[in-house]
Image: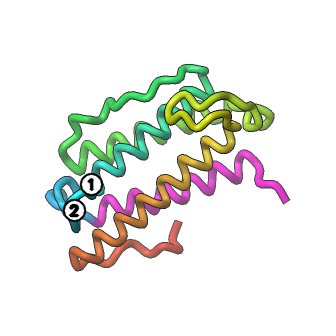
């Protein structure tokens, strides 16, 4: 049984609600500065990556405007990060209706990561999987800081 476009968006929205609760669970200082070991990034940097990928894919797929930039590099407060999260989601919600279900199967060379041809649905799945991966890292960071992560099953 295939998932509809609307079901996919609801799944993505549920994941984002959980990711936002993960951001909210952090105190501001560790959100931007804590790493459990050298070579890892703070959770805020992972969140910014999530936003960049979502914005780039949505604009590319919906508008055929393929640009991978970081308009969030100056974010340095939790409030600013949460505001950026909402702005990116709002743009996604606005652009989503313009993407036809048929457009999901469109194949195009990957303009960002050099991974060859991909269907647009695979780009969306990558964005969702990337978010899940980094949220899992955020959960581990929270536990290492002695903070209980948000309930995973509440979306």
Along the line of sight, which residue is nearer the eye, 54 or 6? 54
- Estimate the spatial distance between the alpha carbons at disc 1 and disc 2, rounded to whole Å: 6 Å
Along the line of sight, which residue is nearer the eye, 44 or 85? 44
Above or below: residue 89 compared with residue 137: above
Locate residue 139, reporting x and y percent: 36, 70
Q: What residue is drawn where x is 19% and y is 61%?
A: 34
Q: What residue is drawn where x is 17% and y is 56%?
A: 33
* Mark 1 crowd level (few <14, some 14–19, many ≥20, 10 Å Cα): some
Q: Determine if the magenta segment contains residue 151.
A: no
Locate residue 94, reporting x and y percent: 56, 32
Q: Residue furthest left?
A: 29
Disc on the earlier residue, 1 or 2: 2
Above or below: residue 37 compared with residue 54: below
Locate residue 147, reporting x and y percent: 26, 76
Disc 1 is placed on an element classified as: loop
Along the line of sight, which residue is nearer the eye, 22 or 40? 40
Asked if residue 91 can be seen in this view, the reply is no
- Magenta segment boundaries in residue numbering: 1-25
Above or below: residue 135 compared with residue 139: above
* Mark 2 crowd level (few <14, some 14–19, many ≥20, 10 Å Cα): some
Disc 2 is placed on an element classified as: loop
Q: What residue is drawn where x is 18% and y is 43%?
A: 76
Asked if residue 16 can be seen in this view, the reply is yes
Above or below: residue 94 compared with residue 21: above
Q: Which residue is mark 1?
A: 41
Q: Determine if the magenta segment contains residue 17.
A: yes
């Amino acid at each position: 049984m295939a998932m509809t476009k609307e079901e996919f968006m609801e799944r993505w929205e549920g994941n984002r609600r959980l990711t936002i609760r993960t951001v909210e669970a952090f105190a501001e200082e560790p959100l931007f500065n804590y790493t459990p070991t050298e070579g890892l990034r703070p959770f805020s940097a992972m969140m910014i990556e999530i936003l960049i990928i979502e914005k780039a894919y949505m604009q590319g797929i919906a508008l055929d405007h393929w640009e991978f930039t970081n308009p969030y590099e100056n974010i340095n407060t939790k409030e600013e990060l949460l505001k950026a999260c909402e702005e990116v989601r709002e743009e996604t919600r606005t652009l989503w209706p313009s993407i036809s279900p048929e457009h999901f199967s469109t194949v195009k060379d990957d303009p960002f990561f050099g991974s060859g041809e991909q269907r647009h649905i695979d780009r969306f799945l990558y964005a969702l999987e990337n978010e899940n991966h980094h949220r899992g890292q955020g959960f581990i960071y929270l536990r290492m800081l002695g903070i209980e992560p948000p309930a995973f099953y509440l979306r």
